[in-house]
Structures are given as C-alpha cells and as structure tokens.
Image: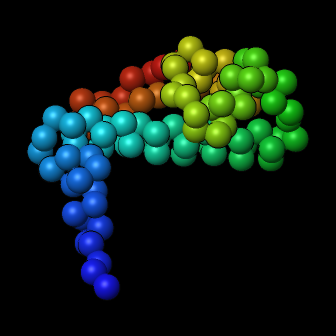
Amino acid sequence: MNFTPADDLVDEVWGKMGTPERDAMEAQLKEEINAYFVGEAIKKVRKLQNLTQEKVGVKKSQISKLESGKCVITLPTMSRIFRALGIATASLDLGAIGKVTLW
C-alpha cells in the first residue's frame, strides 16, 4: 500500500507554493474562513439577544448566507446588522496607522 503525503495532494490540486494558482486558492480559502467566522459571530450575538433572522436589518436570505459563511459581508451591510444588534459604534484597527471609525 502506498501513501501519498497530504502536501503532495495539495500541490497537485492547488498547484505548487508560490504559483499564481496556489496564491489565488489560498487567498480564496482565507476569505471563506473569515466569512465563516464573521457569520458565526453575528449568529451568536443574534441568538443571545433572541432575535430572529428577520429582525437584523437585512433580508432573511442574506443574513442566512452571511451566518453560514456563504458570502462576504460588505461594510454597509455590516453597519445595518450591527446597529440592529445594538452595536452603536465600530472602528477598524489599522495597527501602526491607527484606528478608523466606521460608524
């Protein structure tokens, strides 16, 4: 029985490290993971407040996609949802550059 190392399979499917194909795939994966974590956070806060998907400031189908990580949230949508969840202000931390107030 021959075993193929996982790294070899990843290279075969996504391309070798440093290639445009691999970089694009890794960027897409990172975006999808971030979308999942944002969606999970929204769902957790919404459920803690006993709110239904219909009560968070966007269409139910959109909040469903966001909470499941199937789409990336935009700042205007984030603003509507967060305000509906009672988050009145938000800022973006840009590290050494400082913070930017979003709303």
- The quadrant of the picture occupied by the N terminus is bottom left
Q: Quadrant of residue 89 in the image?
A: top right
Q: In this view, does 87 lie to the left or right of 98?
A: right
**Residue 22: x and y, percent?**
22, 42
**Residue drawn at x 81%, y 30% as measured from the top left:** 53
Q: Is residue 23 above or below residue 8?
A: above
What sort of colour scheme is used for the picture? rainbow
Q: Is residue 72 above or below residue 75?
A: below
Q: Nearer the viewer, residue 20 or 71?
A: 20
**Residue 93: x and y, percent?**
37, 34
Q: Nearer the viewer, residue 53 or 9?
A: 9
Q: Quadrant of residue 30 in the image?
A: top left
Going by the picture, which residue comes out furthest to the bottom?
Answer: 1
Q: Which of 15 and 42 is in front in this view?
A: 15
Going by the picture, which residue comes out furthest to the front?
Answer: 1
- The quadrant of the picture occupied by the C terminus is top right
Q: Is residue 56 above or below residue 37?
A: above
* Residue 8 seen: yes
